Amino acid sequence: MSMKAPPTLLQLAGQSLLRNEVLAISALEKLPMELFPPLFMEAFTRRCTGIVKAMVQAWPFPCLPLGALMKTRDLVTLQVALDGLDMLLGQQVRPRRWKLQVLDLHNVHLKFWKIWSGNMANACSTEANSKKKKRPTEQNGPRMERKPLTVLVDVCLKQSILDAFLSYLLLWVQERKGLLQLGCRKLKISTVHIQSIRKVLEVLQLDWMQEVQVNCTWQLSTLAAFASYLGRMRNLLKLLLSHIKVPASISPEEQKQLVVQFTSQFLNLACLQELSLDSVSFLEDHLDQVLRCLRTPLEALSMTDCQLAESDLKHLSQCPSIRQLKHLNLSGVTLTRFSPEPLRVLLERVSDTLKTLDLEDCGIRDLQLTALLPALSRCYQLTTFNYLRNPMSVAVLEKLLCHTIHANIENLLLGMQEQKPGV
């Protein structure tokens, strides 16, 4: 039977201090900075709201990763932390040890709470640390240059009505415009209500955005309306769009105009690394417009369950932005009637970098695959090749295995399907 370890002297001291709120708050001025994290965790666990507020004001690190302590989005906890920021923002002379630049509400595990050092505090927010280094003249007191605080939160929009946590946070930030900014690194959208989306995006500081996922049935016109916000996400790394539909009622000219309205914003996305388009109806004969606006080489490109023209594949094979591609997914794109030449050229161009290739359920025939084998064998970095749900004869299977036997493929996914006679 294991015995519970007795509390350390540090834990006992913290517990004793928390029994007297007035004493605890007065001690913060001289409290060693390495004691702030364990004392804050203890105060947070015991729901000592007065002490938590005071510690937010006196926080001696650039980042306070509060979200890592919140098991759920607790409105009461949020209000306590924001009250602490409010008291800080209202002071003419900031606390001597004040260093807080970022209140991080991301619900992720951080090592910060286990390592009580200023170096780890700096590491928990690279952005905050880099901003700090750019302030060599910053000083304490009433003449100190005021820089907006940043509150970071991931946003997931599922309904037309926002949840209480996000509603309270948005209103709180709006009422303090100019004093702080609300940043979001990851945005998930699962609602068709564009007005609700706009309400949130108008408050967010969009240059914090790193990943956007749209996973609901949008009309192309809705995507075009969203485009102006997308163009302001200048540090975006990942963009995932799913189920974008084109109504049969719009003319080809209208469709082209809406596609241009959306794709032109790619010119502002200089950091984009991953682009995923699933069940997107506007790509056929318009892929060149998407590719033309890409500014930097992609690492991952996914176009799944989409209708493409053979000319689209030709444009893809010639696109400068695919020269460093590591991951390519074309599953569910019907290639049965296409010449294998564009895909062969594409594989040759990315042979030095390609690590994963997904061609599941593309309807590729034996003659097409045979034409691709020499290019496929040159992809020395390839570790995963998914060729499930494509018709393939035993003879071509043997050729495929011969071409890939010397490669580093760890995951070779093949599915035998009998070809129809005469095909």
Image (cartoon, rainbow, N blue to C red):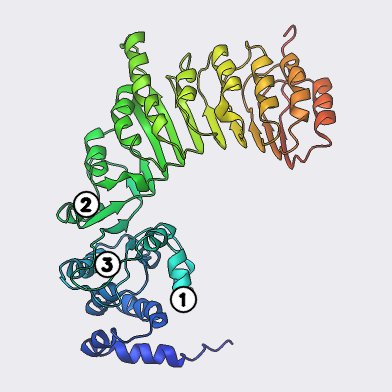
At which x and y percent is residue 45?
34, 76
The residue that disc 1 covers is 117
Pick the front one: 191 or 301: 301
Please name which of the two marks, 2 or 3, marks the residue nearer to the observer. Answer: 2
Q: Amino acid at mark 3?
A: Thr
Q: Mark 2 to mark 1: distance in Å?
A: 32 Å
Q: Which of the two labelled residues, at mark 1 and mark 3, occupies the earlier sequence position?
A: 3
Left or right: 202 in relation to 230:
left
- Per the rendering, the mark at residue 77 is 3
Q: Quadrant of residue 92?
A: bottom left
Tell me the residue at 75%/14% (across/down). Answer: 367
Please give left or right for residue 402 compared with residue 92 in the image.
right
Location of residue 61 in the rendering, given as x and y in whole percent from the top left corner: 37, 71
Q: Residue at x 42, y 19 (%)?
A: 282
Q: Position of residue 103 (x, y in %)?
A: 32, 63
Q: Quadrant of residue 14?
A: bottom left
Q: Position of residue 360 (x, y in %)?
A: 63, 28
Side (left or right) of 354 relative to 397: left
